[in-house]
Image (cartoon, grey):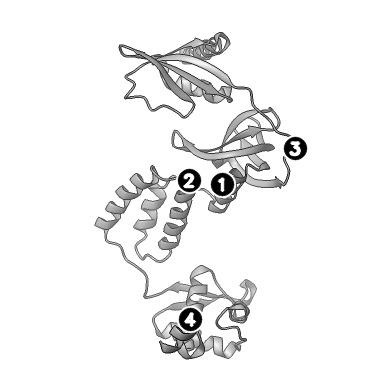
C-alpha cells in the first residue's frame, strides 16, 4: 500500500500475478473462444503483463480455472484448437420475482431515455445475459427490448453518422423494390409507433425521408464531404382533430393554433410529405385537413382507395 501511495502505479510487488493472469484468461474466454496463440499475444500486449508466456504456463492458468470450477473444453484442430468456456461457478441466478420487477422497470426506463443511452443499456444487459444461469432472463429481455433483433454495432455506427450529419450509402431492403442502395444525409434515430427509423435527407429525391432501421442491411460507404447541401421544401398544413388538447401527443413539428369545444386546430410544418400524410391518417376519422388543398385531396383519394379495398 505504501508503494502504491508513493508511486501511484501497479507493480509486480502489488499483485498476485498467477491469480491476475488466470483472471485475464477467464475474462478472455468470457468474450470468445481463444487459442494458445491468442492468449500469449494478449499477454505480450497487456499494459501490466507485457511479457511472453509459454504454452505450458498458459496451460497452468487454464488448469487453475478448471480447479476453481470452470468447465473448459477445447475444439478440434479444424476449428482452431480453441478453448471454450462452457460454464463457470460465478454465474448469477436471478429469482423469477426479480425478473418480473426487472421487466417492469426496463419497460419504463426504455421509453424515457435517448437512443444512445438505450444502446448502452442494451449492450450491458446482453453481456449480463451471458453470465446468468437461468435462461428466463434472456427470454424476457428479448421479449420486451425495443432493440431485439437489431445489430447493435450497426445502430452504433448509424448513431455516430447522425451526430456528424454524414452522407452515407446504405443497402436497404425496400418493401416495394427489394434490395437496393440508397444515399441519405443522416439526421437522427428515433422511434415511431414502436418502430425504429433513420431520419434524414434523401440524395436521390432531395427531400426529407425516414427509413425503417430493421430494413437497413449495412452501411456501404460514408462520405467525408457531402455531395451537396440540400434544403428540403417544407409543407405547412392545417388540420383539425376531434380530441381534447390534453389527450393529444404533439410531434415536434406541430403546434396548437386554437381550441374550439373539443376540436383542436393544429399547424404542422414538415419537409416529408409521406410522413405528414401518415401522421394525419393516424388520427382516423377524427382528423380533417383544411390546408393545403392538394394535400387535402391526396388524403381524400387515399381514404377512397382504402374504402374500396375493404369493399372487395
User: The residue tagged with tag 1: helix, strand or loop?
Assistant: helix
Question: In the image, is 72 to the left or to the right of 46?
Answer: left
Of mark 1 and mark 4, the one earlier in the sequence is: 4
Residue located 40% across and 66% down the image: 131
Residue 105 appears in the figure: yes
Give how far apart the Cα atoms at labels 1 and 3 are. Answer: 21 Å
Question: Which callout, 3 or 2, points to the residue nearer the camera?
Answer: 3
User: The residue tagged with tag 4: helix, strand or loop?
Assistant: loop
Give how far apart the Cα atoms at labels 1 and 2 are. Answer: 8 Å
Give how far apart the Cα atoms at labels 4 and 2 are. Answer: 38 Å
Give how far apart the Cα atoms at labels 3 and 4 are. Answer: 51 Å
Q: Is residue 97 above or below residue 85?
A: above
Please name the residue that numbered disc 3 is placed on.
227
Rendering coords of residue 302 (x, y %): 53, 15
Give how far apart the Cα atoms at labels 1 and 4 are. Answer: 38 Å
Please name the residue that numbered disc 4 is placed on.
8
Contact, mark 1 vs mark 2 (Cβ under 8 Å): yes
Which numbered marker is on residue 34?
none
User: The residue tagged with tag 2: helix, strand or loop?
Assistant: helix
Amino acid at each position: 500500500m505504501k508503494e502504491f501511495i508513493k508511486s501511484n502505479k501497479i507493480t509486480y510487488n502489488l499483485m498476485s500475478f498467477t491469480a491476475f493472469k488466470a483472471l485475464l484468461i477467464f475474462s478472455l474466454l468470457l468474450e470468445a473462444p481463444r487459442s494458445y496463440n491468442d492468449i500469449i499475444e494478449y499477454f505480450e500486449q497487456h499494459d501490466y503483463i507485457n511479457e511472453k508466456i509459454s504454452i505450458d504456463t498458459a496451460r497452468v492458468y487454464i488448469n487453475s480455472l478448471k480447479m476453481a470450477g470452470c468447465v473448459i473444453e477445447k475444439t478440434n484442430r479444424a476449428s482452431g484448437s480453441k478453448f471454450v468456456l462452457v460454464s463457470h461457478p460465478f454465474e448469477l441466478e436471478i429469482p423469477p420475482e426479480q425478473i418480473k420487477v426487472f421487466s417492469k422497470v426496463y419497460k419504463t426506463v426504455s421509453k424515457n431515455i435517448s437512443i444512445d443511452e438505450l444502446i448502452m443499456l442494451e449492450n450491458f444487459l446482453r453481456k449480463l445475459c451471458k453470465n446468468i444461469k437461468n435462461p428466463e432472463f434472456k427470454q424476457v429481455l428479448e421479449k420486451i427490448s425495443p432493440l431485439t433483433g437489431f445489430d447493435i454495432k450497426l445502430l452504433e455506427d448509424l448513431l455516430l453518422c447522425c451526430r456528424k450529419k454524414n452522407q452515407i450509402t446504405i443497402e436497404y431492403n425496400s418493401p416495394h423494390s427489394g434490395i437496393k442502395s440508397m444515399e441519405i444525409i443522416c439526421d437522427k434515430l428515433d422511434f415511431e409507433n414502436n418502430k425504429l427509423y433513420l431520419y434524414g435527407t434523401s440524395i436521390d429525391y432531395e427531400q426529407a425521408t425516414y427509413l425503417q432501421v430493421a430494413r437497413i442491411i449495412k452501411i456501404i460507404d460514408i462520405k467525408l464531404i457531402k455531395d451537396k447541401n440540400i434544403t428540403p421544401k417544407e409543407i405547412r398544413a392545417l388540420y383539425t382533430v376531434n380530441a381534447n388538447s390534453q389527450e393529444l401527443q404533439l410531434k415536434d413539428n406541430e403546434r396548437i393554433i386554437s381550441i374550439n369545444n373539443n376540436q383542436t386546430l393544429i399547424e404542422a410544418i414538415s419537409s416529408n410529405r409521406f410522413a405528414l400524410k401518415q401522421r394525419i391518417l393516424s388520427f382516423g376519422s377524427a382528423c380533417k385537413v383544411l390546408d393545403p388543398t392538394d394535400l387535402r385531396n391526396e388524403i381524400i383519394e387515399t381514404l377512397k382507395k382504402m374504402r374500396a379495398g375493404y369493399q372487395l
